[in-house]
Image (tube, grey):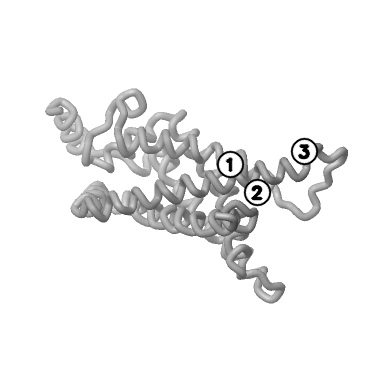
Amino acid sequence: MGFFASSIGKKVVMAVTGLALFGFVVAHMLGNLQVYLGPEALNAYAEGLRKYPPLLWGMRGGLLVAAVLHVWSAYGLTRMNLAARPQGYRERANRASSYASRTMRWSGVILLLFVVYHLLHFTLGARSVHPRFVPGDVYHNLITGFQNPLVSAFYILAMLALGLHMYHGVWSMMQTVGLSHSRYNRWRQAFAATMTVVVVGANVSFPVAVLTGLLRESRLERAAATAGRVTR
């Protein structure tokens, strides 16, 4: 308990949970890319996940624990930093820090709010958030969800916050676990930057593709979705 109460312990917790969350973000992106293969592929992928409830709920539980511990360690480190310097700098020149590192708290808050909204929107299908939600029809839910420009704008904003958070987070995580050396620090930075661009670019492409008409429902798919809502 003394170790976890220390700043080093909290950084280790943040690094380990950050790695788990990073893995989920990448896997989630790869799964969602199947939207470009059509409704059958995306809906079959989602249905495949639901075939194993113990595994699915075990993963969800693990992610929830990781997220709670990640927020807890971030909050603890913030309080320790404020306690160490209760008086702010008279003049501040950010020479060693990046914009991503200086905005970690704000990007973290935005992401926390986004996760709650995202679950209500695409997982739980709350009527107040997604009035055209059809259980099991992931393709329809994605298309109709992103047809609202405000929803797409918020999603894109959240992905930009994810990019800032993930870039500095991946860099810091590798440093915390000991992958920091002058000989390969540039590779560490390149890996963090590359993964950030790939994940953010792929995720932003979904609402953009819907708004531009690249992704859309056929008349038959719309009729089937409407019949599904009426049946419910």
Describe residue 108's horizontal placement relative to residue 183 as left or right. Answer: left
Q: Is residue 41 visible?
A: no
Q: Which mark is residue 107?
A: 1
Query: Could you tell me the amino acid type at mark 3?
Result: Pro
Q: Earlier in the sequence, mark 1 or mark 2?
A: 2
Callout 1: SS: helix
Q: Which mark is residue 100?
A: 2
Query: Few, some or many C-alpha atoms within 10 Å of disc 2 (few <14, some 14-19, many ≥20)?
Result: some
**Residue at x 33% of width, y 29% of height:** 130
Which quadrant would the N terminus be assigned to in this image? bottom right
Image quadrant assignment for residue 206: top left
Q: Which mark is residue 129?
A: none
Q: Position of residue 157 (x, y in %)?
A: 53, 38
27 to 128, vertically: above or below:
below
Q: Which residue is mark 3?
A: 86
Task: Measure the C-alpha gap from mark 3 to mark 1.
Answer: 23 Å
Task: Measure the C-alpha gap from mark 1 to mark 2.
Answer: 9 Å
Q: Earlier in the sequence, mark 3 or mark 1?
A: 3
